[in-house]
Amino acid sequence: MARLQLLVVILLLFFSERIKASEVIVVGVEESIPWNLDCGLSTLNHFAADNGLQVEYRILPVERLFKELNSGKIDFKYPDNPAWKKEQREVRPRFSKKPLFVVTEGFIRRKSEKSQIHKVGTILGFTTPHTEKYEMSFVRDYKSLLQLLISKRVDAVYGNIEILNQAREGRGADFEYSKLAPFSNGDYYLSSVASGKFISEFDRWREKQIRRLKLKDQN
């Protein structure tokens, strides 16, 4: 009897691990984020690999990401932030305790322009500081955003400085960072409406990773 019980326990453990290994998590990611930039996704991939999970990334426009998260069509949204689009949240999601990535956002403009900023372009779904001061134009990606500036349809564009740097490569002599408006830091969190337990597991895994790195540094 004891052997039979032991066999049952072993089989249950085996099949639970098989189920866990085949589990797929669906993560909605902003289409404006270039995949050749990390932006925190490597942390999520590392967690998935350590826990035998498969990650299916769905690249979506910012506005649609909120709808997909609210409806449960995606398990997780990345990046997210508690301060973003509160009016579009039907249910308050669970956020990771710490951001996966910290970004710097700001304005760039044409070097030849020295007047005040009146017209601003940014990514659809983004909110610029002091939005009420500007006439806004919205696009879905950074290539289109920079084109707004090149075509002089806007005085400045606002977004992730690292991505703007990449988008303006080869045009460095044409643009400069605007000193009329300060840079701001933004935190990229992982969020979920339906999978709060997963967020808790992710937080515990990150804490273990941090402790492991601290011990390694001490040695």
Image (tube, grey):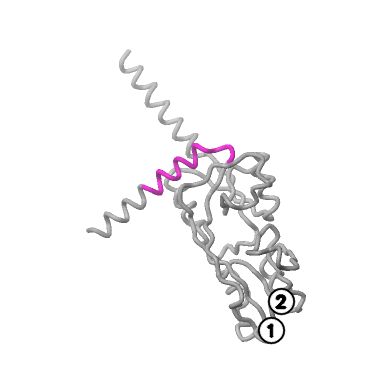
- In the picture, measured across the screen, residue 101 lies left or right of residue 218, that is right
Residue 69 position in % (x across, y down): 64, 44
Q: Residue furthest top?
A: 1
Residue at image mark 2: 155
- Crowding around mark 1 (Cα neighbors within 10 Å: few <14, some 14 to 19, many 20+) is few
Q: Nearer the viewer, residue 111 or 26?
A: 111
| Kind of residue at disc 1 | Glu
Tell me the SS state at disc 1. loop
Q: Nearer the viewer, residue 161 or 10?
A: 161
**Residue at 65 percent of width and 44 percent of height:** 89
| Kind of residue at disc 2 | Asp
Residue 43 position in % (x across, y down): 46, 54
Residue at image mark 1: 113
Give yes or no for residue 82 being in the magenta stretch.
Answer: no
Dots 2, 1 in contact, CB < 8 A? yes
Q: Nearer the viewer, residue 89 or 96?
A: 89
Give yes or no for residue 199 being in the magenta stretch.
Answer: yes
Tell me the SS state at disc 2. loop
Residue 197 position in % (x across, y down): 49, 37
User: Which residues are drawn in magenta?
Assistant: 193-207
Task: Report the predominant secondary structure element of the magenta stretch.
Answer: helix
Q: Is residue 49 above or below residue 141?
A: above
